[in-house]
Image (spheres, rainbow, N blue to C red):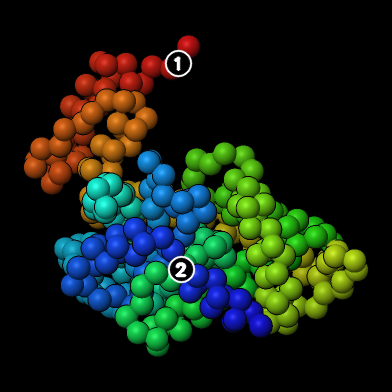
Amino acid sequence: MLSEQIHQELSTPVASEITEFVSAMLGAARPLGVLFYGSGLRSGVQEDTLLDFYVILRRQSDWPRPFLARMGNALLPPNVEYHEIEIGGRLLRAKVALLSLAQFRTLTGLQTWDTTVWARFSQPVRLVWAVDSQAAHALQQCVMRATITAALWSAWLGPESGQPEEFWNALYRRTYQAELRVEKAGRGAGIVASYQDRYDRLLLPCWRVAGLGVHENGGMLKPILSPAQKEKQEKAWGLRKNLGKPLNIVRLMKAAFTFSGGARYAAWKIERHSGITVVLTPFAEKHPLIAGLPLLWRLWRKGAFQKSR
């Protein structure tokens, strides 16, 4: 059953340093749950790994942050925070996105115009912390909905017939194109190749739960769709693609005022890519936009923006 596959994946244990990081990050806060995904899950925690978490809340007030940040998250989710915590003598870094459960349900469904959340949660994910079994079940339902949404779009956007990975690859190629992200060509195909058995096992159960008919022939799958259905969904995807990049641009603008820890995140990225150490003053942490202007000048003077020859 699809629900059993999703449950098994979510409950697969992760490295102890991940659970220790989450426990330290939460402190006294008690959200509904914390989901772990991305390169840190796929490749393990390397020296320069940026961990990726989604914290799911019952209410916006369940996570400590200023009123402006809570309002920003309510109006245009998700908010993103940057956290640094020393675990076992190592400084681990994480990008943490925040959603309410109601937002998570909406953004993993078929009707949403925003492709980012359901696309991410159709990829491998772990539930590393939950406040109770009821919350864990609610989050499992959302992850299953995200996977079904992705599988249906893979049928609508993918080949007329093919092996499972061909449908997933077609889907992720389109979702990456719809987002304002700097990714290497073939990033989605690399994710599918790393978990091919998983993606092979998920596609048919998702289609069946969604009520989509399919012909099977020696490992080849052909979803039962009319040309009119394919054309209708292509137009629907066109609207989502046209909205995708503007949505992400507006989120970036919002992040200038709501990205908690953004100055430390920027300092780490600058040092990682240029080798130039950025010393953050309390003023720079509190006012990163103002402090960033003289920093840009210093970086330019040191040649950080010169193209390598």
Q: Where is residue 119 in the image (x, y as percent from the top left)?
A: 55, 61
Check disc 2: other Cα within 10 Å, few if <14, some if 14-19, many if 20+: few
Residue picked out by circle 2: 13
Q: Is residue 2 above or below residue 88?
A: below
Q: Which residue is drawn at 62% across and 66% down?
A: 150
Q: Nearer the viewer, mark 1 or mark 2?
A: 2
Q: Please, what is the three-letter code of the amino acid marked with disc 2?
A: Pro
Whether residue 110 appears in this view of the structure is: no
Q: Is residue 127 above or below residue 83?
A: below
Residue picked out by circle 1: 308
Residue sitting at the far left: 282
Q: In the image, 19: left or right of 200? A: left
| Quadrant where the image shows the N terminus | bottom right
Residue sitting at the far bottom: 134
Element carrying mark 1: loop
Q: Residue at x 59, y 59 (%)?
A: 239
Q: In the image, 142: left or right of 304? A: right
**Is residue 92 or residue 182 the one in the foreground?**
92
Q: Which residue is drawn at 40% across and 86% down?
A: 133
Q: Please, what is the three-letter code of the amino acid marked with disc 1?
A: Ser
Q: In this view, does 239 lie above or below 2?
A: above
Q: In the image, 212: left or right of 301? A: right
Residue 131, numbered circle: none
Q: Where is residue 95 in the image (x, y as percent from the top left)?
A: 34, 53
Whether residue 24 appears in this view of the structure is: yes
The answer to the question of whether label 1 and label 2 lie on touching residues, with beta carbons closer than 8 A, is no
Residue sitting at the far right: 217
